[in-house]
Each structure stands twice: as structure tokens, then as C-alpha cells.
Image: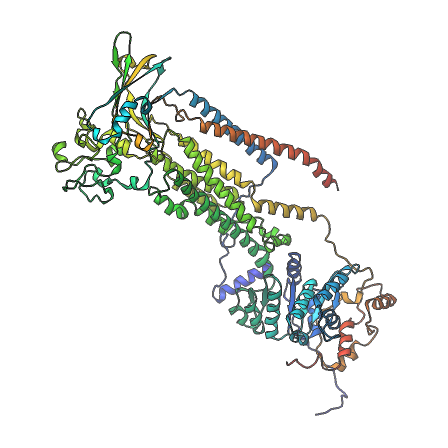
Amino acid sequence: MEKKMKNKTSVATQEGDRCPDNSAFKQQRLPAWKPQLTIASVLSSFFLTGAFCLAVGVCLVLSANSVREIQIDYSDKCSDCSKLRENSSNWNKECHCSINFTLKEDILGDVFMYYGLQNFYQNHRRYMMSRSDAQLLGRNVNRSYCAPFSTYRNGTPMAPCGAIANSMFNDTIDLFYNGNSSVIQVPLLKTGNSWWTDKNVKFRNPKSHNLSSAFAGTAHPPYWQKPVYLLDEEDERNNGYVNDDFIVWMRVSAFATFRNLYRRLRRTRHFADGLPAGNYTFRISYNFPVTRFKGRKHVILSTVVWSGGSNPFLGIAYVVSGAAATLTGFVITGIHLKLRKKKTYFQKQ
Amino acid sequence: MKRKGKNHQLLGATAIEDKLQDGVPETIQLLKLGNIKVWVLTGDKQETAMNIGYACRLLTDDMEILEEKEELRALGVSSQPRVLSPKDQILHTGEVLMEKARWPWQWLRCDSAEASQDQGGLVEKAFVELASGCQAVICCRVTPKQKALMVQLVKKHKKAVTLAIGDGANDVNMIKTADIGVGISGLEGLQAVQCSDYALAQFCFLQRLLLVHGRWNYLRICKFLRYFFYKTFAGLLAQVWFAFHSGFTAQVRDGWFLALYNIFYTAYPVLSVGLLEQDVSAKKSLEFPELYMIGQQDELFNYRIFGVTLLHGVGTSLISFYTALWAFEDHVGTKTVGDYESFSVTVAVSALLSIVLDTRHWTVLSFLMVTATLGQCPHPSPRAKPAHGSWEPNPSRWSSPYASLVSPILGAVPSPDLAVSLQRIHLKASRDPEPPVELRSHIPRGSFRRRSSYAFSHQEGYAGLITRGDSLRSRGPPGDSLSSRATRGDSNPKIPAGFGWEGTLKLTRSHGQGHSTSPVSL
């Protein structure tokens, strides 16, 4: 038949080539690797996967356990401030709250302070759409997505516009260390908390010779107390749209319980190695109301490890999968050993 | 002008031979092994058809031949005018015939006259059932219209896919009626080819068409479908689960991911599967035609498999989503877009791993496609570098691989075609050492063995002249013929002892004149 096919090919070539090419691709003769599921390859893959998952899982669990974390729910503790903030006409009254806690051991290494919110749905679609990235780049553009937080009734545009910016977290949290004799304010870093691309690319202040004139003709959003060019008067590079707290807030969270980086420990003088053991106090200027939507606020102090934070879920999941894979490997080995005798029985026949 | 035949000198004899193509018997054998019933519809006369049947090994010597009388009796048509439950008769007859020791093979020869006189659906159904119970059916003296009608009959009464193959203009009708029409381009012109779905150059290419390419394409389409349903469920149900956590509002962020999911992230490997996948090589497909039955029995894509695929997709989406959710609990502050990205990477990679586990035939193209897809996946968090070094470690580095690994592995376990192919090949391998069981009658009917591919076409009288001899004997019921053959004492079956035309001769005689001489005009 091969000869006939070749003859046919040669005949057809003479008559005007209607035959398909005799290439490996068109004749489906491409060289191929066919993985064979032998007992050796199957068992080795199961055991290897099991071992890998177990190892990774154990490492993850151990590292998660090594994270030192202190989490304090201060919307409960500062209940008088919460009640004050329930009434929105009290917006210009200040309310301060102090929370004490004790560190039994030193926390060595970098320490990060977060604020955490619970039951705050930043992933709601209307909320997430309510921003103007072009405005945040410093341009003067149409802010149609920001409605109803785009202009005031008298026509003054809001800067920054949108519901996300309007609802920015505005509590101020300070940490104090009750030393032997005095109370020291723990030095914290305000900058360097956001992504490089955000700080330098996505958020730009409008250009002008000075910042307040750049925002001339605009007004701050209704829930804010200061205009945007006064967010950080000490550091010009942290003022305006490129303020780190603002940028961190504008990166909305995917889930309703989240934490945002707030401050980092500045490792100088007394705190060069971390946080020493002792008594500490959070002084919070409570502005952000959460009781209306049954939310909660937390302040968290935590170290970081290579694997993330103190959540052991992933480590446990890996351990479980690794155990399941190893168990399955043993089961397959058992089945194979049991059936192997039967196979030789047939082969003898 | 009449001349007395005197003083003539025989100069020679010419013969015209219409040979069978090469490879026809082997092809028919393979098709029969693949559980494909082969019927021959020809316009030739009866002896030619029978000879062709023997020549291409559609019929063998140990088959019992059901001719007109037996058929009509079986169908209950001729003896009684009423057609009372011919189905019962058929079943009864079929069973009786099946149970006859060592003669389970029958072939059925039906004549054109009878075929055109089938009246009533019941008789049709009875006929189709009788014909289906036979190993082979030869219809002779069939006009083109009747060929199409036969195909229609089979399509109507049997839930089977029909394929009609022919090479002449008289086959055009049946090629168009059948589900698959195959035309052989050849010396008889191109009409059959022009109206067909597939055109072949030789009949023996049919075995490659069906057993190799047909089977591969069935496998490829089933894998493709399963994978597409799986990845759609896996990718998009995750959006549904997210809605439970976002107040049931839709999400705008991953619009690009959704749009490009089917085009870029998951399309290439399945393209290579759909084009190039093979479970066994072409050579082995031809050696094991039984593998063809997988397609006939819908084993690679049916309701059960679709349900399993659905469940697998749902499971994958659940694992992907909830792993991401629980791993990132309390840590999703500035990692939000990292979440979306890593989440979409998770889903895309798990879909990719699933097709990787499903691909059994790895060509260079497959590797390229997988690499291209991996290259397109957005990386989990290269952008998450803050101004002062990388202090914010990313748990998604570990959650993505986890979710991506677990769900495809879980889903590969109930992979159906793996199980089916392994089972079939195991069956075949265990069957192979034994010779194929063929029931042969102990008493050799030697005369049939030397059937030739030639047929005579001449007038009635000459047939008798030429074939008279010791091969002329009456054909009674099978028992009698057995005894008569036994008394014949033909020890060496290979020695030709005249032409064995007992059956046809009998029929010719019983039906009198003109049955094999004048062309049938109906």
C-alpha cells in the first residue's frame, strides 16, 4: 500500500498537486513523548508531591507561629468615642482614647503597625468605581464616575473626588513606651508604606509653583477636615495626592476584613533592635465612625516573615495535602502489591 | 446470419475482469472487528454479488445463508397474508438461529423485488432487525433509489450512524442519504466524489479514515469539550463565589482577565490537544480495531462525564477561591491587586495544569503552547515592591501553587478516557495471544474454498452445460446437504472439482428463467 501511495503521489504531482504535503505535521507523524503511567512513575510522583507539600507546609506553619502579633480591637475599648462619632454633628469635636498593653518579651526586628477594619466592604462595585485615576495623576478632567462626590452645589470641584477618597481612614494612632521614668513616643515612619509604582507613577500632584496654588479652586471632600495639600505639612514629598496614607487607602481591599499598613517602626536610639519589653500605650484620635455599619476597628503590631503573616491556614492546607498525597501513595503501593501476584498468575497461563 | 459451426478454428478467448481493489478483504475484516456492520448494496446480479461477497471475505464458508425463502418465512410475509407480530417471529427466529450449534454466523441476501415491496413499518422494522442480526447483508439488483431507501431504512429503525461508500454515479443517492458519505474517486468518474463528505482514492483507505482518524477525532473533540466546560466553570464560578463576599455586586477590576481568559490564558494548550492528540499510534489503531467501539458507545462524552466535569470545575473554583480568601485573611490591605492578579493566576494555572495532566501525546507544539501560556500569565507580585525594599512578603507566592496543584490533581483521578483506554488496551493485550475464535464446521465444504472472483454472465442454458457434473446436486435442508457432502468424500478441499454453484443454481432453477440474464428493469 505504501508503494501505491507513493505512486499516487508521483502521479498526482504530475497532474497538478492535489495531495496534501508529506510533512510530519500534516501527516500527523510528529515525534512525540507519551508519558507512560508505570507504577514507578506514579508512586514516585505521589510520594514526591507528598513530601514537598509536607515540607512546605511544615515550614509555613513554623514561620507563621514565629510571627509576633498584637491585635487590639479599639472600637470596643473606646466606646465613648464611638458613641460620640455616631452623631455626625459632632464632627468637629475631638475625641482621644488611650489603650494600654504590655509586651512580655522584646520584639526583635522590623515591627509594623496596621489598622484593621472589619465589615467594611471596600469591594462594593459602586464604591470601587467611584474614583478618578486621571485626577489623581494631576490632570483636570471630567469626574463623572465620582458622583455624587465630584462637585459641590456651588460648582466647586472636589479634590480628590469619589467615595473612596471621601471615606479615607482618618484616625491618628500614636504609640508611647512607658519607660523607667518617662513616657517615650515610639518613632514611627510615615513614608515608604506604599508601592513604588503608586507613589511615583500613578499618583501625581498637579503642577504648580507651590502645592496650595496647585489645588486652588478645589475643595476637600465633605468628610475630610483638612484639604489634601495639608495632609502632611512636614514632608513635601508626602503631601497632596502622593501622601502614603492616602495612597494606601486608595488601593481598595478585596474583602470586607482587611488591614492596611499605617506606620513602621523607626529603628533608632532606644528602639534600634525592635520593641523592648514593657508597657505601651496607644493614643488614638478617634475620627472614623464604624458603629453605623456594625464594623470594628483594630490596631495591629506585627512582625513579618518570608511567608506572610500569622495566618497558618496555608501551612495547614499544605500539610493536609501532603499527608493525603502520601497516604494515597501508600494505598496505591498496597493495591499494587496485592494485585501483582494475580498478574503473574495470568502470565503463567 | 446462421452458420453451422464447422471448420472453425478457435483462436483464443478474452475475458474481462473487474477485479476487486487491493486491500478490500483486510479492510472489511478490520471494520467487522470494529463492530461496524458491513452491508453491500449492488446493482449486480445475484451470483456476482455472492462471489464478490466471498472474494472480499464478507462471507465465509461457515456462514449460514438466509435466502429469499427463509427471509420471507422469517418475516412472516409470504406464507400468511397477515403480518402478525413479525417482531416476535424475528426474535424467535433469531434466537433459534443463534442457538444453532456452531452456526451463529449468517448472511442475508435480499433481492431487489422484495426490498421494494416492504409495506408497513412493522415489516420494515422486522426486516431491519433480521438484517442487523446477521453478520453481513448483501443486496443485489438494487437500483440507486433503492440504495438510498435501504440507508434510510437503517437510519429510521436503528439508532446507528450510517456510512455509505461508493464510486459510481449510481451510488450518489445513497451517499447523500447516509450520515457520512464517502466517494471513491476512480475510473468511473467523479460524481460520487462531488456529492460526498469524504473522498478517497481507494477503498482500503477507509480503514484509516475510520479507525485512525475518525477515532482520533472523536477523542480530540471529547477532550476539547470536557476541558472547555471545565475551565469555564473553574474560572467563572469563582466570580460567583466572590459575589457572596462583595455584597453581590459585580466586579470591574478583572474585566481584562475575564475577556482574555478564553482567548489567551487557556486557549493554546487545548488547541494543541484538539489538533494533535493521539491515544494510541496509527499502527496500533489499525491493529486493535476494537478501540473503535469506544466511540460507538459514547464512552468519552456522555451525561455522566459531563456531570463529573461540572463537579470538577465547581470544585476547582471553590478550592481556588477559598484558598485565596483564607490565606489572605487579615492580610489583604495593600495586596489587593496582588490578590486579583494572584487569584487569576491561580485559576489560569490550575486550568493549565489540568490540560497538562490530560494530554497524553506531547509534541513540540504542545510544549510550546504550554510555555506560551505560562509566559502570558501575569506574575503574582513583581509590582509589589515598595519604596524601601521588599519588606512585604507575599503569601500569594505559596497560595497560588497550592490551589493550582490541588484541584487538577483531584480532577485527574476520575479522568474517563484514561480509564477507558487502559481498559481497552488491557483487554486487547490479554486477548492477543489467543487466536481469534472462529467457529468452523468440522466437515469441510471444500468446494466453497476456491471461490474465484469471477462471475459468469451468459444465458441460462450455457450455465447448465458448463457446470453440469458432479457438482450438480439438489440443495435440501442443511442436514441433507451435510450428509450429501459427507458422501462426496472430498478429502482434499483444495482441488477444484467444478464450480461450486449449488446455491445459486438451485435458486436459478427454482426461479426459472431470466433471473440472471436480462438486466433488471423495474
Would you say residue B411 is visible in this rendering?
Answer: yes
- Residues A108 and B28: in front is A108
On screen, residue B328 above or below B112: above
Which quarter of the picture shows residue A190?
top left
- Residues B458 and B333: in front is B333
Q: Which residue is outermost to the right?
A: B487
Q: Residue at x 42, y 34 (%)?
A: B324
Q: Which residue is outermost to the top?
A: A181
Residue B477 position, x and y percent, is 82, 69
Q: Which residue is outermost to the bottom?
A: B1
* Quadrant of the snapshot with the N terminus of chain A: bottom right
Would you say residue B361 is visible in this rendering?
Answer: no
Residue B194 position, x and y percent, is 51, 69
Residue A13 position, x and y percent, is 49, 63
Residue B286 position, x and y percent, is 62, 54
Which quarter of the picture shows residue B134?
bottom right
On screen, residue A115 above or below A125: above
Residue B336 lies left or right of residue B270; in this view the side is: left
Residue B191 lies left or right of residue B258; in this view the side is: right
